[in-house]
Image (tube, grey):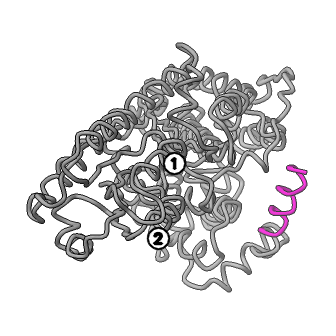
Amino acid sequence: MISVLLGVKTKKMTEECQKTDFLKSASVEMIKTADDGKAAWELFLKYRPELVVLETDLSGLDGFTLAKKIRKEAPKTALIFLGQKSYEEAKEALDLHAEGYYIKEELALGEWKGILQRTAKKLDLQKFLEKCMLQCQISNYFLGKYGLDQEILKEMFPKRMDFMVLEQDHMPSEFEEIMPVREEAANPKKVMEIIRRDADISYLVYLAPYRYLCFYEGNVDSNQKAYELKENLHKELGKSFSSFLLCRMTKMDMCYENYQKMEWLFEQRYFEGEGVVMDSLFYEKPKNENREISLENFRISLEEGCLDTCLKELSDLFLPVLKNSDFRSFTSLVREIMTIFLKYDNKVLNIHDKEVFTLHDGDSQEFLTVKETIRWLRNKCRELLAYKKEEMGCSQYINQAVRQIIVEYKKPDLSVEDIAQSIGIRVNRMNEMFKEELGETAGYFLTKVRMEKARQLLEDGVRVGEVSNQIGYYSPSYFSKVFKKTYSLSPKEYQKQIEVEKFAAKN
């Protein structure tokens, strides 16, 4: 679709062209009209149409004088002239590289529509080919294959633009060799089709799996645009995308320079969560401490089967990583922990039931954020030690009860009586066995599992009422009472404390 300016005096032509049916059938999005040269020039400066149709004998400014001004202001604007049977006029139109010169007395309205249709189709094709060529150039430029020709840049990318990267949330490439399943990349053709529906996007480049570069003019709200695009992609594809605002009102060479400098910003997304909008103006490159990390205590607690100590060691290992948003240390730490887990992968650890501990459950979704990755590792610790308890003499009944609690804690009606019945023993006997083997009753263990999950959800910003529902409590007030008794803070006080700690860590 192209925009058109008519600088003509013929009223029938201007009236016909303003009709909705004509616009639709002629494949044009806008037609502005003026019956004298000066008015046409003012409209041109205001709307910057792609095609200008001029009668040669306009008053104020004649068609050819106006065309020369237009050529000087915007050399790529297409021109069509309507004139007399004159060799001189036809030659002048040819010298100005016009799309056509037509004798207005011989031009019927029906014929005019066909001319406009053919011209619009030609110009649309030219725009498409030019955009494809530039996008190919930009892609190769950002991939470091070769530089951009400055003349091409000047001609095809004259404006300062905002620059944004849209990236599908995915597992870090550093984990590919330790996690056999990757988050499936959305079809690039479909992604680009959705993004291109946004009229503000001037150029779009598919740079690599998961990553897309978007250029748009700086007269829109960048944050709002980022939210709109990622929400549209999520709605239509069911996949989470994050947006990174890298430049504002910048020339192409600066866009590239900032892109190179901001590579670390894509890593920081893992600390922020899924489907986030990150503005480079509000982030500073974190310092990688490269400190030596010892996993010996974690390894020992895992070998000894002490779950509480194991989870505490895990938290202590990741605490400085989270505090400093240290992505390099994070990936290194995860890889080392996974190496320890691999020792137990696909081995029978439950002697009586011949149950096998499987490290890889095939769900790469757990590795899309730092928090989810740590949570996955904690759950694997619980799962592994639940299997190892049998090997270390823990009762088969307790093993079954612990697994049932971990799986079914969300059920509001879950009770110790139900658990005892399902494993085939009396409640009192089950509690005696829990105290003997784990040092606590089954009811206390169930509460501890629920409170640990509640703490994780509160840290993720989930509302107190929703947390109560998700961990098996009908009453939010009762949940709050149990939570405060466990952690000496109400759920709301705990969330405020977490927010303060996050703020302090960032500043």
249 inside magenta stretch: no
The quarter of the image holding the N terminus is bottom left
Is 429 or 223 nearer to us in this picture? 223
Residue depicted at x 54% and y 83% = 474
Residue that label 1 marks: 69
Part of the protein shown in magenta: 495-507
> Exactly how many numbered labels are in the figure?
2
Q: Secondary structure at mark 2?
A: loop
Q: Residues within 10 Å of mark 1 (few under 14, many from 20)?
A: few
- Which one is earlier in the sequence, the residue at label 2 or at label 1? 1
Q: Amino acid at mark 1?
A: Lys
Q: Quadrant of residue 227?
A: bottom right
Nearest the eye: 406 or 17? 17
Decide if residue 143 is on the left or right side of residue 19: right
Can residue 302 be seen here? The reply is: no
Residue shown at 77% from the left, 48% from the top: 281
Q: Is residue 502 magenta?
A: yes
Spatial distance from mark 2 to mark 1, Cα to Cα? 76 Å
Q: Secondary structure at mark 1?
A: helix
What residue did someone put label 2 on? 411
Q: Residue at x 56, y 29 (%)?
A: 153
